[in-house]
């Protein structure tokens, strides 16, 4: 049985972190920012478990779900690139369903 996810402070880098799905995720920098780290952890857990409501979701619906999750975890410039290429991908796919 695996351990439950909880935040922990990594001294060598000075970040609050959590291990989710085997990957370490940085939440907030500095020991004093534990409350911010907990808030980001809860946001991460909410986004992680969301799935499209219907099994016949359009490609555009999946792209929107991806962008919603990415907006909370990547830098603004990175998100701008994601949005540009995701929009091109959705347009190329047209009205195909999954």
Image (cartoon, rainbow, N blue to C red):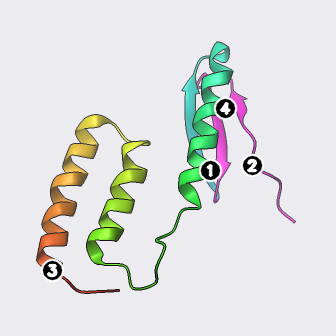
Q: Nearer the viewer, mark 3 or mark 2?
A: 3
Secondary structure of the residue carrying tag 3 is loop
**Is residue 83 positioned above or below 12 on the image?**
below
User: In the rendering, at what x and y percent does residue 13 appear?
Assistant: 58, 25
- Local crowd at mark 4 within 10 Å, few (<14), some, or many (≥20)? some
Query: Along the polypeptide, which appears first: circle 4 or circle 1?
Result: 4
Identify the residue shown where x is 22% and y is 62%: 86
Is the Cβ of the residue at disc 4 closer than 8 Å to that at disc 1?
Answer: no
Q: Is residue 8 magenta?
A: yes
- Local crowd at mark 3 within 10 Å, few (<14), some, or many (≥20)? few
Which residue is tagged 1?
Answer: 45
Q: CA distance from mark 3 to mark 2?
A: 39 Å
User: In the rendering, at what x and y percent does residue 38 appear?
Assistant: 67, 32
Query: Along the polypeptide, which appears first: circle 4 or circle 2?
Result: 2
Q: Is residue 41 magenta?
A: no
Is the Cβ of the residue at disc 1 closer than 8 Å to that at disc 2?
Answer: yes
Query: Along the polypeptide, which appears first: circle 4 or circle 3?
Result: 4
Secondary structure of the residue carrying tag 1 is helix
Answer whether residue 16 is visible to the viewer in this image: no
Q: Check the image and name the residue furthest to the front.
A: 53
Q: Nearer the viewer, mark 1 or mark 2?
A: 1
Query: Along the polypeptide, which appears first: circle 3 or circle 1?
Result: 1
User: In the rendering, at what x and y percent does residue 47 appear?
Assistant: 53, 53
Identify the residue shown where x is 12% and y is 76%: 92
- Local crowd at mark 1 within 10 Å, few (<14), some, or many (≥20)? few
Q: CA distance from mark 3 to mark 1?
A: 31 Å
Query: Which segment did they paint magenta?
Result: 1-21
Q: Which mark is residue 38?
A: 4
């Amino acid at each position: 049985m695996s351990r439950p996810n909880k935040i922990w402070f990594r001294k060598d880098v000075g970040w609050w972190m959590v291990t989710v799905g085997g990957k370490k995720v940085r939440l907030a920098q500095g020991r004093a920012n534990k409350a911010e780290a907990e808030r980001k952890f809860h946001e991460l857990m909410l986004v992680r478990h969301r799935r499209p409501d219907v099994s016949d979701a359009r490609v555009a619906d999946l792209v929107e779900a991806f962008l919603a999750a990415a907006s909370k975890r990547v830098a603004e410039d990175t998100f701008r690139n994601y949005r540009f290429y995701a929009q091109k991908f959705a347009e190329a796919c047209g009205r195909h369903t999954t």
